[in-house]
Image (tube, rainbow, N blue to C red):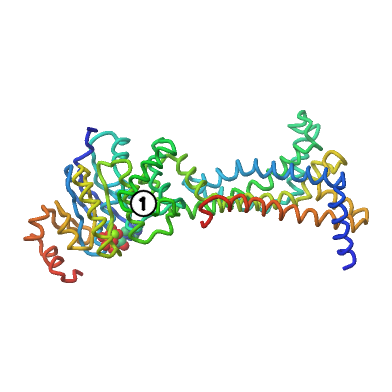
Amino acid sequence: MNDIAQGLWQALILVVSLDADLVEITVLSLRVSLTATLIASAIGLPLGAWLAVNRFPLRRGVIATLNALMGLPPVVVGLIVYVLFSRSGPFGVLGLLFTPTAMIIAQVIIITPIIASITHQTIRELWSEYRDLLISLHTTRRQRIAALLWDGRRALMTASLAGFGRAIGEVGAIMIVGGNIDHATRVLTTAIALETGKGAFDMALGLGFVLIALAIAVNLALHMVSNTERGARW
Amino acid sequence: MVATVLPLTLEEVTLHRNGRCILGPVSLEIPGGGITVVMGPNGSGKTSLLRAMHGLERINAGQVRWSGETERVRASQAFVFQSPILMRRTVVDCIAYPLRLSGMGRGAARTLAAQKGAEVGLADSLNQPAHVLSGGERQKMALARALIRDPQVLFLDEPCANLDGRATLDIETILTEARNAGTTLIMSTHDIGQARRLADRVVFLHDGKLVEEARGASFFAAPKSAEAAAYLRGDLLT
Ligand SMILES: Nc1ncnc2c1ncn2[C@@H]1O[C@H](COP(=O)(O)OP(=O)(O)OP(=O)(O)O)[C@@H](O)[C@H]1O
Ligand SMILES: [Mg+2]
């Protein structure tokens, strides 16, 4: 109990004093996870929608795989990305290992299935509602997907937020591909792991509270942005 | 004037679902102009027939033939479903949607949609989300959306089911205006009074079969088939 109180106190001090290290790792956390969320959304939203409106032979298999990939262990993803981008790996020449870019790549792999899968569910329901109308209006495949994504945007924002939540709290993969290098690839979660390892629980807890506050703040911000839009009643 | 896609010809059109023949074989021709009313008891295949004509149902045998190339044929039709399909948008954006699909800019499309919305009596609800509309208003919205691209052929599946007298009258007025403007209407209804008021031609179905096809006046004055006569008398067909 005392530890938690101390952690909260520590978090308060870190935030109020705008501790330079804290600001740096917080900004990097946000940058990596928001970028990963944007990229994963750009892939996952259209992919999920496409799967919802198209029938093709391996459709069920693809959807089952996607759902299974939602549970992909981050450590394994990290390991695979590590091997691919290590000096001797196929993408070694790019020199991306231990950079924020590698961390973004790992997170994109982890959260794209989540976003695509939730999108697929959402869009499938909307498609069963809109189907007759969109077919009757002689829409192209593109137009269908565009209408479904647009009209489902509120639910889809939730899909992206779920992805972001997973990314910002993820530690296994970015630890491996980022290396938790001070002033280079250290983010909130890897810093927490480090502080915990050192036995500095109050610091670790302090960072933990900052992380939670950050996740909540991003969610709130997005909800506020979308609620100011007219027609929020859907 | 754009080249007409009519007449519409059905040759031995047959629909099977779940191993059962639910429609046909139906052969009939619908010329341009006027209102064709599809009548028949529940489950007789009215909806299936309209959907098959419009290309929404896979046909197991026979042919639906329009004149003209497919693209133009598809673009010249509109369909109003029995329960209106509402998009999660404002009323004016729902009505504007078909114009947006045709590539019209948002501003121009909304202007035209607002006019069309006002014509059907939705002037006060244009900026509401579509789902707050009442049943009658939803049907008017669907009608405005269907008419916005000036279709040559308008299908309506029981457009006034569950509507009261006032709303029904409003909708019948809009339909009559569309007919007078040259649109060909093909609609189903359960309402014998409505069929009497609107029908230039009647297609009567029973058990998925085309039982009778006649001019409106002669159908109501003297139906030729026993089924249609019984239906018009108000007997319960089984
Ligand atoms: N997709 C389908 N699968 C199986 N049966 C179907 C399908 N669509 C329609 N049917 C059946 O075909 C028959 C005709 O249905 P349809 O909806 O065309 O009748 P309807 O004349 O429009 O009836 P109602 O007056 O109740 O609207 C019904 O018995 C219905 O159960
Ligand atoms: Mg029906």
Using residue A163 as the reference point, say whether residue A233 is left or right of it: left
Which residue appears at 37% of the width and 44% of the height?
Answer: B113
- Where residue A32 appears, x then y in whole percent? 74, 42
Which residue appears at 57% of the width and 45% of the height?
Answer: A45
Q: Nearer the viewer, residue B81 or A118?
A: B81
Q: Chain of mark 1?
A: B
Identify residue type, mark 1: Ala
Q: Residue furthest front?
A: B124
Q: Residue furthest top?
A: A93
Using residue B27 as the reference point, say whether residue A148 is left or right of it: right
Which residue appears at 27% of the width and 58% of the height?
Answer: B158
Q: Nearer the viewer, residue B91 or A214?
A: B91
> Looking at the image, can residue A78 be seen?
yes
- Where residue B136 appears, x then y in whole percent? 33, 60
- Where residue B14 appears, x then y in whole percent? 25, 51
Residue B149 location, quadrant: top left
Look at the image and tell me in which quarter the N terminus of chain A lies.
bottom right
Residue A5 location, quadrant: bottom right
The quarter of the rendering in which ligand 1 is drawn is bottom left
Which residue appears at 84% of the width and 52% of the height?
Answer: A15
* Residue holding disc 1: B123
Using residue B196 as the reference point, say whether residue A139 is left or right of it: right
Q: In this rendering, is residue B56 above or below B169?
A: above
